[in-house]
Image (cartoon, rainbow, N blue to C red):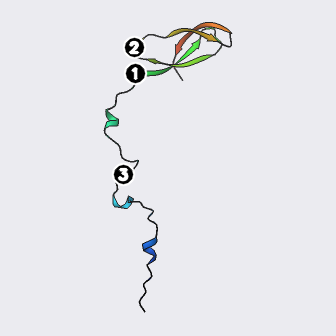
């Protein structure tokens, strides 16, 4: 008797999705334009209170435009007054 039913291999799900066939599309592909992009001139800095309360702000500055240390007068909620905040590196 002739068997006309389809085999199980015809309806089995393909879980490889082309991986074994050398498919190059997917997250592993890197573009050359990523290597050609310039670094950002903006860096994050920490503004530490001169009142020695330990309070600080985190902000950004353009490293090329402002080469000196940044000093701003801002509000210190621990000291409850405006004090000078000086730039320090983020640890």
Residue 48 picture location, percent across and down: 58, 14
Q: Quadrant of the N terminus?
A: bottom left
Mark with earlier residue (1, 3): 3
Residue occupying image coordinates x 43% and y 21%? 42
Residue 17 in percent (x, y) is at 41, 60
Dot 3 lies on which element?
A: loop
Residue 37, placed above or below residue 15: above
- Residue appearing at x 39%, y 13% in the figure: 65
Which residue in the structure is indicated by mark 1?
41
The residue sitting at the bottom extreme is 1
Residue labelled with disc 2: 65
Return the disc, 2 or 1, that comes first in the chain's sequence: 1
Q: Which mark is residue 75?
A: none
The residue under the point 40% across, 25% down is: 40
Which residue is pictured at 62% across the width and 7% down the height?
82
What distance separates the C-alpha of mark 2 from that of mark 1? 9 Å
How crowded pointer 3 is (Cα within 10 Å; few <14, some 14-19, many 20+) is rated as few
Cα separation, mark 1 vs mark 3, equals: 33 Å
Q: What percent of the width, then of the height, locates residue 52?
A: 64, 11
Q: Are marks 2 and 1 in contact (CB under 8 Å)?
A: yes
Relative to 83, does residue 20 appear above or below in the rendering?
A: below
Q: Quadrant of the C terminus?
A: top right
Helix, strand or loop under label 2: loop
- SS assignment at label 1: loop
Labelled disc at residue 25: 3
The x, y position of residue 64, in whole percent, is 38, 16
Cβ atoms under marks 1 and 3 closer than 8 Å:
no
Q: Camera-side residue: 89 or 56?
A: 56
């Amino acid at each position: 008797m002739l068997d006309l039913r389809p085999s199980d291999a015809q309806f089995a799900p393909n879980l490889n999705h082309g991986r074994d066939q050398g498919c190059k599309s997917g997250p592993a592909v890197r573009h050359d334009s990523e290597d050609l992009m310039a670094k950002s001139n903006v860096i994050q800095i920490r503004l530490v209170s001169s009142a020695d309360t330990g309070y600080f702000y985190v902000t950004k500055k353009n490293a090329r435009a402002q080469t000196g240390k940044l000093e701003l007068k801002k509000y210190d909620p621990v000291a409850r007054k405006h004090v000078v905040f000086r730039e320090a590196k983020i640890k």
